[in-house]
Image (cartoon, grey):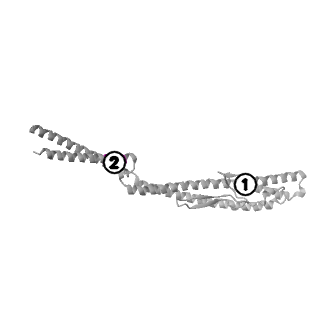
Amino acid sequence: MPSVSNIAVGAAMAGAAAQKARHQMNESIARLSTGIRSMYGGDAAGQSIANSLGARGASFAVAARNAEDGLSFLQSAESLLLEMAALTTRLREIGIQYGNAALLTANEKVALNAEASAIGDAIDGIADNVKFNGVQLVGNATGGGAVTIGINDAGDTATIGAATSLAIANTDKITGASGVDASADTALGEIAKSLGNVAAGMSAMKGYQAVANVTAANLKAAAARIQDTDYALETANLTKAAILNQSAMAMVAQANQAQQAILSVIQ
């Protein structure tokens, strides 16, 4: 018959095994409930790497949003330039029409002069005053029409915009229709260059955005593979720990019963 001391040692060992199993159960429950594999120090080194990858992924996601803002800026600039092109085309028509001044009535000349002056003022007003979130959309004699966009997590930037001086031969000084067709031709050339810059900027922004989106997704996926709980494995670990806990507790109960039986015989 085993001695009371031997049974007590066995009970203590079974109790320790049960306690260990309960700790393992708690760890598995924590990892399953949070979805984080490094809970309870499960993979501290991996978590550090995952944090770094996640931070870079978040930075590239911001870069993608920057590119989207850049596209919005360029789309607004494009719309504005097209409107200016329409006005400038009309200005050119007026200049050509005024070339036939000898056959125009006095009232027709007055109307053409007034329209030319109004169009000149409108074009200048657009170039000087129409903005996107406070940023001038189209460049004029004093600059403007360009912005700098952050394109990745390394701090690299790209400058986009119309970025040309809209030389419309001092359209704010147009007071009549005579000769404005030549000024309009110059302006239309500048508008064409600006539209070319806008188109190139759009292509660049779309490329930067695509790269940033893909890179952000890849980095986040890599972080998830390192950080996220393997639910199948952790569920199996929880089941194993629960079985071990039940077995150990059963052994403790048996050992206690055996001790009571021996003590009752001795007494």
Q: CA distance from mark 2 to mark 1?
A: 64 Å
Q: Which residue is mark 2?
A: 27
Magenta stretch holds residue 56: no
Q: Earlier in the sequence, mark 2 or mark 1?
A: 2
Q: x%, y% of residue 88?
A: 76, 56
Answer with left or right where residue 222 lies relative to residue 100.
left
Residue at x 80%, y 60% (from the top left corner): 181
Amino acid type, residue under disc 2 in the picture: Glu
Q: Which residues are magenta?
A: 24-31
Quadrant where the C terminus lies? top left
The amino acid beneath tag 1 is Asp
Give the overall secondary structure of the magenta segment.
helix
Q: Is residue 42 left or right of residue 175?
A: left
Q: Position of residue 86 (x, y in %)?
A: 74, 54
**146 left or right of 233?**
right
Secondary element under disc 1, as helix, strand or loop, is helix
Q: Nearer the viewer, residue 243 or 114?
A: 243
Q: Which mark is residue 128?
A: 1
